[in-house]
Image (spheres, helix red, strand yellow):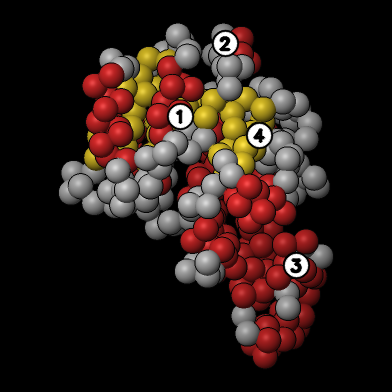
Amino acid sequence: MRISVIIPVYNAEKYVSQAVESVLQFDEVHEVILIEDKSPDQALQVCEKLSRQYDRVQLYQHPDKGNHGAGPSRNLGIEKSTGDFIAFLDADDYFLPNRFDAERELFKNPDVEGVYGALGVNYYSEKAKEQYYSLFKDKLTTVYKRHSPEEVFPGQLHMLGSFGLFSIDTLTIRRESLMKKMKPLFKSTLRLHQDTEFLFRLSYYLDLYPGILDKAVAVRGVHEDNRITVVDSKKVNPAITRVLLWKEVEEWAKKENTIPDHVKLHIERMHRSFQIANATTSKKWGMILKYLVKDYQSIRSGIYNINFRENLF
């Protein structure tokens, strides 16, 4: 295996060295590609030092040296990659020694186009734990049972009951399959949830298989300066970002002729549910009454969706 690991770097001067060193422990890693995204801290200088220190570490910036977000940064990393497989890592997270144990065996089968595993959590400070323990707790982010590839896409769309989640940090993909079947790659229209939207489409086009699900293969590092801090500080409304996510998914599904109509309808209802949840109270009831008249099943599906119920009022 020749794996290219892509790490977008933004505001992570304290953590990127740990991320890189956690990747370099694997002989299978052909290259570590750092995409520095105009960080406000000293991350660029740290990345330059890492690229000088390690032959396998390559450093790039966007052509205009600007800030473009994690999605376009990952796209640039994919463009620059030369490995047969691609893995991703956020700059404040890190891999564990078992990260590619399942992949070594599974990718012997040419039908396996991607492998996903479980993600753990580490709080870098007590303050970070106080802020975000209610969100992440000490649980694994994982898929709860071993699903066949054709179940991964509907599972992520909440169509199979309690499916669970997997993180992009735990995903490894055949580069050839990715480049042949995924256009576009990560979308630049989403600043948040772009990895979720990418995983939806990826699981539709590629055959993804479960790797290690009962223990972490990578770790999410939680600190006060995580991207989620922006959401928490109200600079970004999390309800609005979910509306935008499902809008993107719905627009893609409408254009994809091979998606069954019942799946398209489910995606439309998810988008509608978040639209209603994000509306003002008066507008919310107006939308509910409208859809009760026009499409009872649609609003009913929203009311019984846990995400919608939690954000209704």
Q: Which residue has dot 1 on it?
A: 19
Please provide percent x and percent y for residue 146: 76, 28
Q: Quick check: marks 1 and 3 in contact, CB under 8 Å?
A: no
Within 10 Å of the Cα at label 1, are there few (<14), some (14-19), or many (20+) other Cα atoms?
many
Q: Which residue has dot 4 on it?
A: 120
Residue sitting at x 62%, y 37%: 122
Reading the chain from its start, which is encountered first: label 4 or label 2? Answer: 2
Within 10 Å of the Cα at label 2, are there few (<14), some (14-19), or many (20+) other Cα atoms?
few
Please provide percent x and percent y for residue 245: 53, 59
Q: Amino acid at mark 3?
A: Glu
Residue sitting at x 77%, y 68%: 309
Question: Disc 3 to disc 4, how far (Cα)?
Answer: 25 Å
Reading the chain from its start, which is encountered first: label 1 or label 3? Answer: 1
Question: Disc 2 to disc 3, how far (Cα)?
Answer: 41 Å
Q: Which mark is residue 104?
A: 2
The number of callouts visible is: 4
Badge 2 marks a residue whose secondary structure is helix
Front: mark 3 or 4: 4
Query: Which of the 4 image quarters holds residue 112?
Result: top right
Reading the chain from its start, which is encountered first: label 4 or label 1? Answer: 1
Q: Quick check: marks 2 and 3 in contact, CB under 8 Å?
A: no
Q: Amino acid at mark 1?
A: Ala
Residue sitting at x 78%, y 75%: 296
Viewer-nearest residue: 274 or 235:
235
Query: Which of the 4 image quarters holds residue 44?
Result: top left
Q: Which mark is residue 198?
A: none
Q: Which residue has dot 3 on it?
A: 310
Front: mark 1 or 3: 1
Please provide percent x and percent y for residue 79: 30, 32
Within 10 Å of the Cα at label 4, are there few (<14), some (14-19), or many (20+) other Cα atoms?
many
Badge 1 marks a residue whose secondary structure is helix
